[in-house]
Image (cartoon, rainbow, N blue to C red):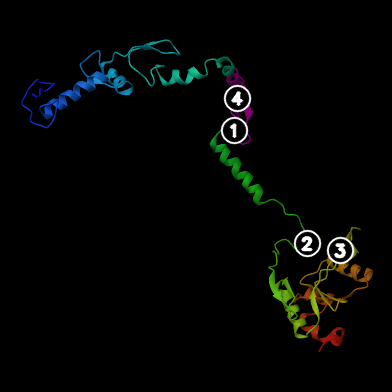
């Protein structure tokens, strides 16, 4: 059977094929098939697939023709999807139906802004939602506010017991006594605790409160620092105020407390109690020593 190429009609087959005599005829057949699928440009002989490639090619001819959906202007060059002539029309089209409502909101906002205000720094009139008329006045105002915060008066607690102004907060250190009772004490209280450990007394950190009346007539509870054999109490004070002195005395009288006050090295409070080194000399503890 004689084979005939469907492209050029030749009988001289150079490749093993039933329809094409050469590779060139195969490519020619492929190009013709692509042309049948693609769209030919109406202004030139080029072929393009539908959609983006064809639309972009039409721009090169500058003959793309449509009407903007927002402003109805005739356009000869495509922008975006081809519905609008510009980004302004594209954004404005979505709010076109609510344009009156939006204009009213803008109008009321503008009216609020045009009400004059007085600058707290230069006392000049300005029209803005800011606190000052300019950045310069704003910096001055912020610096004044910061100075006021730094120099804010601190409440005087020297007559209330507890911490004094500038005295700082005592650091609490974990401590375990010779009876394996765990507690938290400051440095001065640890000195007292070591003295009690050396005497081998049955002591612990006190958690029991005793009622007393303040100088102002208020009812509160007083908590001594240490307890020995459930009936002897020790209180350590590095400094003493009138309120503290009244508190300890009133609690001692009202609750019949066996209370011993230990003071620090401050000479002003020597007469208010005993020193840490004098704890061993107390007759109060002789019955408990081993």
**C-alpha span from label 2 to label 1:** 43 Å
Q: Earlier in the sequence, mark 3 or mark 4?
A: 4
- Tell me if mark 4 has few (under 14), some (14-19) or many (20+) residues whose alpha carbon lies within 10 angstroms of its own: few
* Span highlighted in magenta in the image: 104-132
Do the CB atoms of the residues marked 3 and 4 lie less than 8 Å apart? no
Please tell me which residue lies in front, 165 or 248. Answer: 248
CB within 8 Å, label 2 to label 1: no
- For mark 4, what is the residue? 113
The answer to the question of whether label 3 and label 1 lie on touching residues, with beta carbons closer than 8 A, is: no
Within-10-Å neighbours for mark 2: few <14, some 14–19, many 20+: some
**Where in the figure is residue 184, as x and y percent of width and height?**
72, 70
The answer to whether 279 is drawn above or below residue 52 in the figure is below
Q: Residue under circle 3? A: 221
- Residue at (54% x, 38% y) in the render: 136
Q: Which tag is nearer the camera, tag 3 or tag 4? A: 3
Compare marks 4 and 2 and give the one earlier in the sequence. 4
The residue that mark 1 highlights is: 130
- In what element is the residue under mark 3? strand
Q: Which residue bears the numbered disc 2?
A: 158
């Amino acid at each position: 059977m004689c084979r005939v190429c469907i492209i050029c009609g030749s009988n001289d087959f150079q490749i093993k094929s039933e329809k094409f005599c050469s590779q060139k005829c195969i490519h020619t057949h492929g190009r013709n098939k692509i042309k049948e699928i693609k769209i030919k440009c109406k202004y030139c002989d080029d072929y393009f697939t539908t959609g983006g490639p064809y639309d972009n090619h039409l721009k090169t001819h500058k003959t793309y023709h449509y009407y903007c959906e927002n402003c109805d202007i005739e356009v000869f060059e495509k922008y975006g999807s081809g519905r609008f002539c510009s980004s302004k029309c594209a954004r404005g089209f979505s709010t076109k139906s609510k344009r009156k409502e939006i204009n009213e909101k803008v109008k009321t906002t503008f009216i609020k802004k045009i009400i004059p205000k007085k600058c707290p720094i230069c006392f000049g009139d300005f029209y803005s939602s800011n606190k000052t008329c300019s950045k310069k006045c704003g910096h001055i105002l912020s610096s004044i506010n910061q100075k006021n915060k730094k120099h804010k008066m601190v409440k005087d607690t020297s007559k209330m017991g507890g911490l004094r102004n500038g005295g700082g907060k005592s650091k609490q250190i974990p401590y375990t006594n010779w009876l394996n009772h765990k507690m938290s004490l400051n440095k001065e209280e640890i000195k007292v605790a070591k003295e009690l450990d050396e005497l081998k007394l049955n002591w612990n950190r006190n958690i029991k409160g005793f009622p007393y009346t303040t100088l102002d007539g208020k009812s509160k509870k007083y908590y001594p620092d240490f307890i020995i054999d459930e009936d002897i109490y020790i209180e350590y004070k590095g400094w003493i105020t009138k309120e503290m002195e009244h508190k300890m005395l009133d609690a001692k009288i009202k609750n019949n407390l066996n209370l011993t006050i230990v003071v620090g090295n401050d000479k002003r409070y020597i007469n208010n109690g005993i020193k840490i080194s004098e704890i061993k000399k107390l007759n109060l503890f002789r019955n408990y020593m081993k």
